[in-house]
Amino acid sequence: MARWVAARAFAPGEVDCAITVMLKILDGKCRMAPEEKRVMALLYAATRALPAQRFGAAAHALIAEGCEREDEAFRLMIYERRVLAESMLSRPVMKAFKARIRREGLFDLPVAA
């Protein structure tokens, strides 16, 4: 995954999209297949150090904690942050991000990549 990401230029807005998808995975509202969720989590991890446009250290800290905790109260807090994050991104930006990663073969990579 790191090589796949390194071979592409990710705009700060696209990093925001990866962060937002990771929040959606953690809040339990993501409708992706389990393998797609795993690939998206790997994408988030590979883009985590890249500059984001809107989200930064606080979002990364929340995600890190969310990966460790499974209590409902914390999941609700992640849900609220995710909804706020989605409201800050335009639909066309998120759709373009999802289309790009599909077009460029993200989900065709071996899961262990």
Image (cartoon, grey):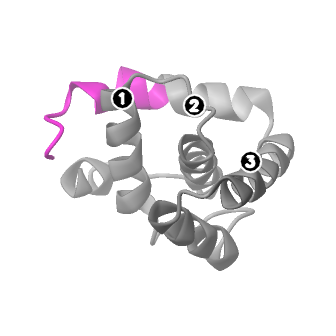
Q: Nearer the viewer, residue 75 or 2?
A: 75
Name the image quarter holding residue 96. Answer: top right
- Going by the numbered disc 1, the residue's amino acid type is Pro
Residue wearing tag 3: 79
Residue wearing tag 1: 34
Report, in whole angstroms, how far the alpha carbon at label 3 lies from the one at label 1: 19 Å
Q: What numbered label is drawn on residue 61?
A: none
- For image coordinates 47% across by 24% down, the residue present is 32
The number of discs equals: 3
Residue 57 at x, y percent in the picture = 63, 78
- Vertical relation: 46 (above or below) 65: above
Mark 1 nearby-residue class (10 Å; few <14, some 14–19, many ≥20): few
Does residue 52 appear to the left or right of 86 in the view shown? left
Q: Earlier in the sequence, mark 3 or mark 1?
A: 1
Q: Which residues are magenta?
A: 100-113
Q: Earlier in the sequence, mark 2 or mark 3?
A: 2
Report, in whole angstroms, how far the alpha carbon at label 2 lies from the one at label 3: 11 Å
- For image coordinates 27% across by 50% down, the residue present is 7
Residue 99 at x, y percent in the picture = 51, 22
Q: Nearer the viewer, residue 109 or 74?
A: 74
Residue 5 at x, y percent in the picture = 32, 52
Residue 59 at x, y percent in the picture = 65, 67
Q: What numbered label is drawn on residue 30?
A: 2
Q: Secondary structure at mark 1?
A: helix
Report, in whole angstroms, how far the alpha carbon at label 2 lies from the one at label 1: 10 Å
* Label 2 close to label 1 by CB (< 8 Å): no
